[in-house]
């Protein structure tokens, strides 16, 4: 019993932040002074909710922490039913995994609202913020490239996953869709933005913005679409889609036929579990609900700020021929 009491007491002093969620996120102290912010690093905000994803979350947070580009990693835990002991254990394990100057902190959110992932936080000391999910794995080189693209376009959203709004001519209403040649939305699976947009989303915009945040709570969805509305309205420009060398969305069932079995073992055999708990696993309903969000946001704002972008920014382009391999055309350097 004495050992257990000592262990619990030890956990209480681990980096589990209980103060950020209780303070006023829109207080002046949470508005950063640009002169004090670092421009050579980024703060990573990982959204966490499902306890079944904790092993994968642990791996992703540790990988981000190991990057010299990352100033700090905040795990934003939004599940109010998770016990304090579970989060303290997570904080303890993550503290053992942090590398170099980058710390990993677990923040228990004050509610399960999806709006909470965009709250301003006085602990953020960088101009750039990476919003990401707990089931998306990105290689370090792709993170570095995306950050360089953002540094050249700090007023725009940068991401690896793109979607689009459009008009359904039959119903004469906005819809959520995918186009092969254009896009107007990047997802919070991986989204880089400047820190000031957190304040604009959470604290600005008056009654109209408050109404749109309430729509996010009612729909339990679409916080990423609303952030795209906020940024497009402020920047008068669409997002930038960036190509990645290696990105794996563990919540996307389309990965099932392309996953190495040894890799699954290394990732704690979480493929099926992660897929099942993903919000977007309810495909048809999910797309319809997001179309509903676009219509409601447009009605609340009174205009459509989303702007189309075209093409993808890639790190390098090499001239290669295409060779036939196994009945498919592949780059010739993959043929041999």
Image (tube, grey):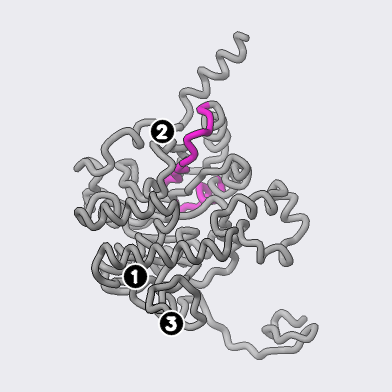
* Quadrant position of residue 92: top right
Q: CA distance from mark 2 to mark 3?
A: 50 Å
* Residue range highlighted in magenta: 62-84
Residue 150 seen from this side: yes
| Mark 2, residue position | 17
Q: Please state if 27 lies on the left or on the right of 76 as rendered.
A: left
Q: Please state if 307 lies on the left or on the right of 175 as rendered.
A: left
- Picture coordinates of residue 206, whole percent (x, y): 19, 54
Closer to the chain start, of discs 3 and 1, is 1
Residue at image coords 26%, 52%: 210
- Picture coordinates of residue 130, whole percent (x, y): 42, 55
| Mark 1, residue position | 152
In the image, which disc is placed on residue 170?
Answer: 3
- Picture coordinates of residue 19, whole percent (x, y): 35, 31
Q: Please state if 102 lies on the left or on the right of 203 as rendered.
A: right
Q: How many marks?
A: 3
Q: Judge the density around disc 2: few (<14), some (14-19), many (≥20) Cα neighbours within 10 Å.
A: some
Q: Is residue 145 above or below residue 81?
A: below
Q: CA distance from mark 3 to mark 1?
A: 40 Å
Residue 241 seen from this side: no
Foreground disc of the pair 3, 1? 3
Q: Residue 203 colored magenta?
A: no
In the image, which disc is placed on residue 108?
Answer: none
């Amino acid at each position: 019993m004495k050992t257990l009491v000592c262990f619990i007491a030890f956990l209480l002093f681990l980096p589990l932040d209980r103060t950020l969620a209780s303070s006023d996120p829109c207080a002046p102290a949470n508005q950063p002074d640009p002169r004090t912010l670092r421009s050579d690093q980024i703060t990573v905000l990982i959204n966490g909710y499902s306890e079944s994803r904790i092993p994968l979350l642990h791996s992703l947070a540790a990988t981000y922490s190991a990057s010299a580009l990352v100033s700090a990693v905040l795990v934003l835990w939004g599940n109010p039913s998770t016990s304090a002991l579970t989060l303290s254990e997570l904080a303890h394990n993550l503290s053992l995994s942090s590398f170099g100057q980058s710390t990993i902190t677990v923040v228990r959110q004050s509610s399960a609202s999806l709006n909470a992932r965009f709250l301003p936080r006085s602990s953020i000391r960088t101009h750039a913020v990476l919003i990401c999910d707990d089931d998306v794995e990105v290689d370090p080189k792709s993170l570095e490239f995306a950050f360089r693209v953002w540094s050249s376009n700090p007023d725009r959203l940068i991401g690896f996953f793109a979607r689009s709004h459009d008009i359904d001519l039959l119903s004469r209403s906005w819809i959520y869709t995918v186009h092969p040649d254009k896009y107007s939305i990047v997802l919070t699976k991986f989204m880089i933005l400047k820190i000031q947009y957190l304040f604009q989303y959470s604290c600005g915009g008056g009654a109209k913005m408050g109404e749109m945040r309430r729509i996010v709570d009612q729909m339990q969805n679409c916080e990423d679409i609303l952030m795209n509305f906020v940024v497009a309205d402020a920047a008068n420009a669409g997002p930038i889609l960036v190509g990645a060398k290696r990105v794996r969305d563990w919540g996307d069932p389309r990965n099932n036929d392309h996953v190495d079995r040894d890799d699954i073992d290394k990732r704690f055999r979480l493929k099926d579990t992660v897929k099942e708990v993903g919000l977007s696993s309810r495909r048809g309903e999910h797309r319809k609900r997001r179309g509903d969000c676009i219509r409601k946001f447009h009605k609340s704002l009174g205009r459509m700020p989303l702007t189309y972008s075209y093409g993808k920014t890639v790190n390098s382009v090499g001239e290669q021929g295409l060779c036939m391999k196994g009945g498919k055309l592949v780059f010739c350097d993959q043929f041999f």
